[in-house]
Amino acid sequence: MTVEELKTKKIAVLMGGLSAEREVSLNSGKAVLASLVKQGFQAVGIDVGRDLPQRLAEEKVDVAFIALHGRFGEDGSVQGLLELMGIPYTGSGVLASALAIDKIASKVIFASAGLKLAPYQVLRRGEELKLANPLPVVVKPSREGSSVGVGIVRDTSRMQAALDEAFRYDSEILIEGFIDGREVQVGILDGKAFGAIEIIPKGEFYDYEAKYTDGGAQHILPARLPEAVYAEVLRQGEKAHAALGCDCYSRVDFLVTETGDCYLLEVNTLPGMTDLSLLPEIAGGAGISFGELVLRILQAASLKI
């Protein structure tokens, strides 16, 4: 849609929600809403609950800008509702969203596309663990973001505590072989990679606290990689985005080893849009302001089914 067309529409910024990432989503939504209002759009914020269909109808919403994170927002649920109601929305569609948030399902797709993954195993609640990889390993819920429930296990005495924490958030968890590499995130906009940032967390890894606490991690833009490796991680980011059928934008997370191997971690179909978030920072390094980033995402709003 053109800017002129969008200026005639009622735009709802969907934020908050019911997931463990609610507070992060509220911050993303407030930033997006402020930007849209500043740019002259008829924008309102909606704190998403189970009454979302009624709220959308009451507000007479024409277009939805989704600033939700985690379950019931990033997993295809809200996208399906918007499709049913005929309301164009930002970001990826139902299937891509559902695949991306499910780390088990997405790994199957990534492997079939030839993307490099850490060795992993799946453990379901009630099953006995027979560890397939030597320590250290990374334990994580299958369907959470922002490193919620994630732990690194370096000693067998810590394994049960890590399993219990991951199972708090999901009935299926992943146990991945630990990859010693740089944490590198690739920004995707309009299906094209436009930069990569390197993260050096102050703690053991880039956990929830490091992501959302000022000073919790050092950000290096562009990522300190050899030219050929930098080009390759951008290419792999585009490949991962396309493999899931993502639309418009995403952030793709990697671990890049000293030998230049790019291990794909995940694709985030609704990356954070806060003042500490990585996608806006990558965009800034590419000469794209926060307002322009928001506008380009909004202009790509559509129905996907």
Image: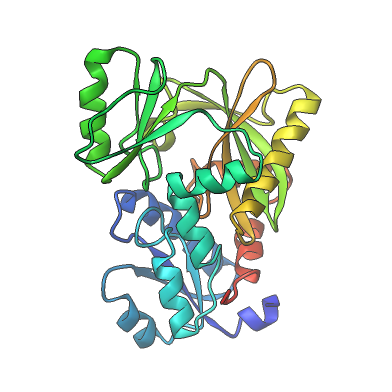
For the N terminus, which image quadrant? bottom right
Horizontal and vertical percent position of residue 113? 65, 45
Q: Quadrant of residue 260?
A: top right
Horizontal and vertical percent position of residue 28? 45, 54
Horizontal and vertical percent position of residue 71? 35, 56
For the C terminus, which image quadrant? bottom right
Horizontally, is 198 left or right of 50 in the view?
A: right
Q: Is residue 258 above or below residue 190?
A: above
Residue 290 shows up from this direction: no
Look at 44% across and 51% down and name the residue there: 101
Look at 24% across and 18% down and name the residue there: 158
Horizontal and vertical percent position of residue 300? 64, 69
Seen from the viewer's position, the closer of residues 132 and 196 is 132
**Residue furthest to the right:** 228
Residue 219 shows up from this direction: yes
Q: Is residue 39 above or below residue 163?
A: below
Seen from the viewer's position, the closer of residues 105 and 269 is 105
